[in-house]
Image (cartoon, rainbow, N blue to C red):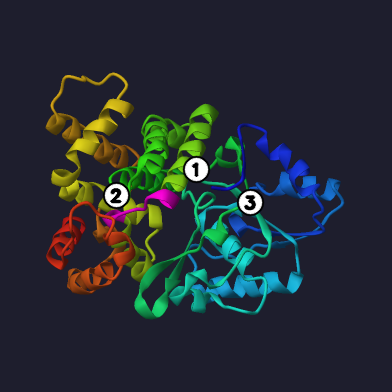
Amino acid sequence: MPKNIIAGEHAIEQLACIIAKDVKKIVIFTDKGILGAGLAEQTKSLIEEAGIKYVVISEIPAEPNYNEAQAMVDIFKKEQADFIIAIGGGSVMDVAKLASILATDDYTIKELLDNPLLAKKQVQSLMIPTTAGTGSEATPNSIVGVPEKKLKIGIVNPEMIADYVILESRMIKNLPKPIAAATGVDALCHAIECFTSVKANPISNTFALEALDLIMNNIVEACTNSEALEAKSKMLLGSFYAGVAITSSGTTAVHALSYPLGGKYHIAHGVSNAMLLTPVMKFNQPAIKDLLAIAYDRVIKDGNKELSIEEKSAYMLAQLEDIVKVLEIPTSLKEFDVPAEDLDDLVAAGMEVTRLLVNNKREVTPEDAKNIYLEIL
């Protein structure tokens, strides 16, 4: 886990204390949208008040491939900074985390695709998420596209875990609903997948269940009401907890089968996960119904505890499906012009994500993957 987590409204003001510790030069990783929305202004002001030099790198594209991420890291290296601040969503934080272990010329991102543990932490990092979210602020993962494989690949190295995290509800106050919804469901997927993973354990379950509770009971209000700062704070915390669960457990077939949709068709990660959430969980139901019943007892506040395991399990799946529907997230690949003739390629690419498929409680065969994709084609 990150060593220092500061959460709550006005948490950003604690930045002054963090950078007072012998920091000489800061690189801020962000993107044009964050700058345009003014979300980096308070951070910049606090740095200026501390009299510390800083540079802003804001050319980070959404869901970059490894070449695009490397270009950002190369710009960072020239600045010779001793502290990194990432203000943004998953893509921004993932690139910043890579920069924190690639400050020298010893390795490139391409080399880390094959051997992610080569690099070591070289620059301290602070993550300030502007979505709730990807959970990237909590994880040792960085997701990059690999164009030649038409796939996204996760680089996993515990050295990338952030040194500091600030969870500030005002950072997501005016997040547009489509982005809030897609990233919120991404966090929801993290929680339910980690809880039902083969690698689930008492530590991951502690965080995954709390995340599931916070997210399912706050996601709709947080995404539809810009003034709902309490719900947004709970979503930020839930997203962070779900990220912690990833580090101890791991996501499953939802994420595995979604990676080709982002890698080849550039569908937003949260949207592709939302599409696959219900089909995969229904496929998994025979193997995870006991776990879904436990989740029901924790999450559904006015639920009937006398229901059978099968009834509780079915209710949880219906709730997951309803959240995606209420938030108006696309549920069909037709909206993205994905042709049916690409089905075999999708299956082949999805089956390559063995790092996550091995976590699934129910084995996913190529035929199973084909049937799951058919549900959203």
Closer to the camera in the image, 331 or 293: 293
Kindly indicate the quadrant of the structure image that contains residue 253: bottom left
Residue 304: x and y, percent? 21, 19
**Which sits earlier in the primary sequence, circle 3 or circle 1?**
3
Residue at image coords 85%, 46%: 49
What amino acid is found at the position of numbered circle 1 in the picture? Phe
Task: Measuring from the top left, give residue 106's x and y in whole percent.
Answer: 62, 79
Above or below 3: residue 299: above
Nearest the camera: 359 or 256?
A: 359
Q: Residues within 10 Å of mark 3 (few under 14, many from 20)?
A: some
Q: Is residue 163 magenta?
A: no
Label 3 sits on a secondary structure element that is loop
Q: Residue furthest right?
A: 51
**In the picture, which quadrant includes the C terminus?**
bottom left
**The residue stretch that appears in magenta:** 246-254
- Name the side, left or right, on which 313 lies relative to 27: left
Q: Amino acid at mark 3?
A: Asp
Question: Which residue has dot 1 on it?
Answer: 240
| Membership of 251 in magenta stretch | yes
**Between tags 1 and 2, which lies in front?**
2
